[in-house]
Image (cartoon, rainbow, N blue to C red):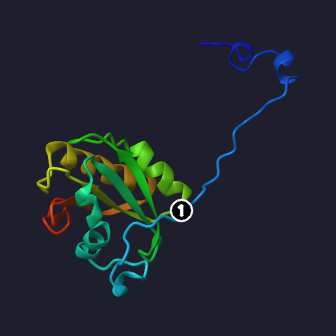
């Protein structure tokens, strides 16, 4: 156990200039799907199939992409956050990274999306485990995880529709 001096330093250290980084959200607009159907121009999704329709271009990616859609209290999309771009068959996803952005955007809920470059939408053991961890972390910080959608070759799998959440 340290003393106050070993933890905070001496008074001489207080006389030095202190520089801290300021944290502030910065958003940019990105095109995620050109020529999207007219009914998707609103920022509210009513079904996993609509999410798939907007993010179906992920099926052409050769690496796994893990994305979180941030939703407000009325389940309208605030923004999307590309959490991770991984390798051919995995991406590293940590709850800290998922909820860091969600808290900065003041999200009330999330929809998780990732692709399987193999085209097979069957969830892996890791997919099931990370979803369970993210749902638990969301409950802890007050941000609900509404669904996790896996995009494959011309198809998708919704954890909610399959009863996996």
Q: Is residue 103 above or below residue 19?
A: below
For image coordinates 41% across by 82% down, the residue present is: 41
Q: Quadrant of the N terminus?
A: top right
> Left or right: where does residue 145 sit relative to residue 5?
left
Instruction: Determine which residue is flagged by label 1.
Output: 106
> Left or right: where does residue 25 sit relative to residue 9?
left
Q: Is residue 97 above or below residue 68?
A: above
> Left or right: where does residue 147 sit relative to residue 159?
right
For image coordinates 35% across by 45% down, the residue present is: 85
Which sits in the foreground, 154 or 6? 154
For image coordinates 85% across by 23% down, the residue present is: 16
Which sits in the foreground, 61 or 144? 61
Q: Quadrant of residue 58?
A: bottom left
Residue, far bottom: 38
Q: Quadrant of the C terminus?
A: bottom left
For numbered disc 1, what is the local secondary structure? loop
Q: Quadrant of residue 147?
A: bottom left
Q: Is residue 10 above or below residue 36?
A: above
Which sits in the foreground, 145 or 150? 150
């Amino acid at each position: 156990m340290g003393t106050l001096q070993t933890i905070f330093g001496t008074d001489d250290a207080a006389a030095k200039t202190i520089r801290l980084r300021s944290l502030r959200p910065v958003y940019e607009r990105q095109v995620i799907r050109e020529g999207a159907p007219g009914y998707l121009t609103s920022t509210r999704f009513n079904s996993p199939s609509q999410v798939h329709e907007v993010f179906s271009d992920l099926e052409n990616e050769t690496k796994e992409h893990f994305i979180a859609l941030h939703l407000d209290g009325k389940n309208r999309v605030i923004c999307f956050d590309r959490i991770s771009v991984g390798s051919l068959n995995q991406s590293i996803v940590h709850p800290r990274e998922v909820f860091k952005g969600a808290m900065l955007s003041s999200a009330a809920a999330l929809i998780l999306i990732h692709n399987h470059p193999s085209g097979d939408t069957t969830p892996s053991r890791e997919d099931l485990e990370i979803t369970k961890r993210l749902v638990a972390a969301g409950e802890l910080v007050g941000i609900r995880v509404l669904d996790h959608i896996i995009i494959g070759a011309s198809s998708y799998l919704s954890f909610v529709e399959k009863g996996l959440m």
